[in-house]
Amino acid sequence: MGGQFLRVLFLAASAREAFASCAYGTHLQPRAEGEVKVNTFGYTGQIGPLNWHALDAANGACLTGRQQSPIDMVAGSFNMIPSSELALDIPDFTAGTEFENLGTTVEVIAKGGTLGFGSKSFTLQQFHFHLPSEHLDNGTSQAMEMHMVWQSEQQEIAVIGLYVQIATEGAAPVVAAPVQTVERRGRFSRRNVELERRQNGTVSAGAVAPSVLLETVFSVADAITTPGTKVETPPLIMSEVVNLLKANSFQGYMGSLTTPPCSEGVNWLVSTARLGVSATSFLKMRDIIGFNSRFPQNAPGQPNALQFASTGLAVQNSALSGVSFTPNAATGGATGATAV
């Protein structure tokens, strides 16, 4: 079931219209030579997620889309996909690469990397960070989330999401138990044993060590505290993340960009792995990035959270429009309500 589900994901229509940091560097928002694009949307107030649909006519999916991201990764909202069904390869960036501040996030430009499944092949474009995590892990928010953005020759978009936890010195990376295949009444299904045990409360998520990759990237973040700036990183050892992803499984679903215009048709693969970041680096990135997470959306296929809320508000206002309050002459208060 997992393989068939992922094939459906990768063959589905891709998100094709966007102006968003989540898809920066792809066909949706090409990167101009020598330029660091600073986004004009935000995460609070008039430019925040509650009003993205009003910032531009192209952002309609933010209000009406029914396959929106991020979501709460609970049973029934995704399908477990073993890493064996993916061909993942990212070379080490031995010469370093560009690390830039887009205003809404900080982003590392990729220098190669492929993700293959069946006849589809995706190329890694960039990876960026959200604080706190955008996806919830069975109702629980994580300190950060890293999004690895991939694009195919057919201009389809896939994103690998990796939760980032505050690290514990001396701890090891979280490696989930291997996915087991079980047969139930003639139908095959896959389940992740570690995930089930953790969701049932029988094991803890565990401590993680600081990621060498993240610590290396974040070591030069002081040079890009201002939106629109960039810096060269030291050599990046990508094999650390590749090995961790291959040792774990993925929670797959069809969703959207988590930034305007919230275009749908994005193939999400949220890893069961965890990366660690030192407390020092986390505080540094918190000061640079600030808060940049879209609120969780309804499960795929359900009504858009904003549209659902606006419909409920309209119903409430309609009900209240038929009620008036009669002042109490003695106290100046309302003595009761009468229908009008």
Image (cartoon, helix red, strand yellow):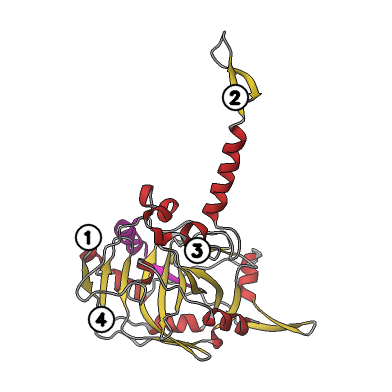
Which of pointers 3 and 2 indicates the residue nearer the eye?
2
Residue annotated with mark 2: 324
What residue sits 60% from the left and 77% below the top?
Answer: 80
Mark 4 or mark 2: whose residue is earlier in sequence: 4
Residue plotted at (44% across, 58% down): 294
Q: Which residue is mark 3?
A: 70
Whole-angstrom CA distance, mark 2 to mark 1, is 53 Å
User: Which of the two discs, 1 and 3, labels the residue nearer the N terminus?
Assistant: 3
Q: Which residues are magenta?
A: 272-290
**Any mark on residue 226, and which?**
1
Earlier along the polypeptide chain: callout 4 or callout 1? Answer: 4
Element type at mark 4:
loop
Q: Amino acid at mark 3?
A: Pro
Does the magenta run of residues contain 30? no
Q: Position of residue 234 (x, y in %)?
A: 24, 78
In front of the other: 288 or 168 = 288
